[in-house]
Amino acid sequence: MSAPVAQEELPILEAVINIRNRLTALKRDRAEFIKPSDVNALYQAVVKQVTKLNDVRDDNTTYNNRVDTTLADVFSLLSLCYLTLGRTKECPAVYSQLASMRQFLSHMEESGVYNESDLAPFQRRLSELRHIVQQDAERSKHPEAMTKLLERQFNECDVIMRSLQDSLSVLSVELVPIHERLVTIRRQLVALAAKEGSHKAEIKSLAEELRKIDSKRVDGKFLGPGGIMPTSQALCTSLIEECFDILQQIKAQDESKNVASSLKPIHDRLNELRAELENLVLTHRWSLRETDLYNYSMSLHEIDKMRIDGKFVDTEGNRPPGQYVLLYLLRRCYGLIYRLLSSSEPVSEELIPIANKLSTVKKCLNEVYKFGGPFTPRDLYPYQLALHQIDSMRKDGRFVGVGGNIPEGQGIVMAHLNECHELLEMLKESMDENEDDQDYDDEDESETGVAE
C-alpha cells in the first residue's frame, strides 16, 4: 500500500501526471515520428520536478507514494522514447533497461533456478550501462538528479546480483555439474508443461535422467570422491525434489494443459503476451517501436501484483494447480522484454526503414558476390537503383528527418551504405574482368582462324 502524498508534494504530483499524459499521447501517435525536441522538453520538465521533490524530501528516508509510482511511469516512458530516437548511449535510455533487469533478476532469485552462466550476461550488461552513466556524469551531460536516480537503480540490481552470487558461492565444486544439469532439467520440464500438445517422449526422457541423478544419492545425500559428503547439499536436494514435484504435477494434470478454470484468464492473457513478444523478437527490426514495450510491461506488472506470497490464488484464497505454468509464462515474458530492450540499436526510428533496406541490399549483394558471375549490367541494375534512391535522400551528406532535425544513427547507416557501394564496385570489376577474358578468347580464336 502506497503512503499518502504530503501537501507540499501535491503540485509536483499534478505536474508529473501532466507530463505522463503528454508522453502517453506521444507514444500513441503512430502517424508521426517521435520528435527529439518534444522528448527533450518533457525530459527537462520532469528533471525540474525531480529537483523540486529532492528539495522537500529527506535523503535518508525511503519514500513510496503516488508521486514515486507516477515518476517511475514517466521515466519508463521517457527511457523508451530515448531508445526509439536511437539515443541508446545516454542516461535516460538506461532507466528502462535497469528496471527490466531488476524485475527479471528478482524473479530469478525467487525461483532459485539459475547458475553462473545465467548471471554472467547480466553482470556484463550492468557494467556496460554503468559505463554509459559514468561517462555522462563526467561530461555533465545530464542533471545530477538523473544520475542519482540511476545510481539507486544500479544499487538495487547490485543487491539482488550479490544475493544470487552468494547463493551459488556455497555450492561445492563436486556438486556444480549436478546443479547445472538440474537447473536445465527443471527449465525443460516447465517449458514442456506450458506447451500445447502431448510431449510424453520428452517427459519420459527427463524423468529417466532425474532418476539416474537421484540414484547417486546415498541416504538422501550426494557423495563426492572417496565417499566424502560435499557441503551445500540443500541447493541440489531442493532442486531435484522440485523437479520430481513438477513431473508429478504434469502427469496428474494431463501434462498441465488443463490449468484450473479460475486461472484460465491469466493463463490465456500471458500466453497471448508471450506470443506477441516472441513475434516482436523475430520482427523487431521492422515493426518495433520501443515505446510499445511500455504497455507490455504494465500488463505484466498488473498480473504479477495478483500473486499472494508468490502464488496465484482464486476468489476463495486457494492456490489452484497450474502455478508452474503461469510463473514460467510470466518470467518468459519478462525475459523477452529485457532481450528486446538490450538489443535496441542506436538508430532513430526515422532511419530504421533506410537501415533495414540497406541491410537487405547488403545481404543480397554478398550472396551474389559469394556465388560468382558472370554478371550483366541488367543483373546489377536493381541494386544500383536502390542505392541511388537512398543516396538521393541525403542533404549535405546526411539524412535529414522531419522538421530538419538530424536523426541518431547517421554513422551506422552511412557504414551500411558505403559497404553496399563497395560490394557493388567489386561486382562491377568482376564483370569487367569477365568481359576482358571473353575479348581475349575471341582474339585467340580469330588469330587461329587466320593461321589456318
Image (cartoon, helix red, strand yellow):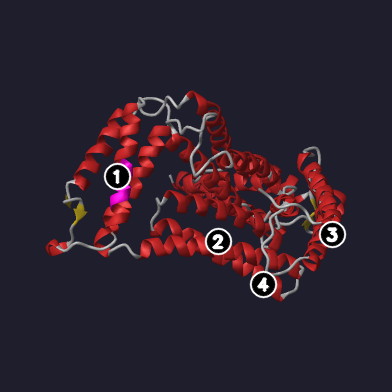
Q: What kind of residue is marked 1? A: Glu
- Residue in the foreground of this view, choosing between 281 and 4: 4
Position of the C terminus by quadrant: top left
Residue picked out by circle 3: 8
Identity of the residue furthest to the left in this view: 226
Residue at 60 percent of width and 57 percent of height: 98
The residue labelled by disc 2 is 157
Amino acid at the residue labelled 4: Gln
- Mark 3 and mark 1 in contact? Answer it, CB < 8 Å: no
> Alpha carbon of mark 3 to alpha carbon of mark 4: how far?
34 Å
Rendered location of residue 27, percent (x, y) = 76, 43
For marks 2 and 4, give the CA distance: 20 Å
- Sooner in the amino-acid sequence: mark 3 or mark 4: 3
Q: Is residue 59 visible?
A: yes
Is residue 304 within the magenta segment? no
The magenta span reads 237-243
Q: CA distance from mark 3 to mark 2?
A: 31 Å
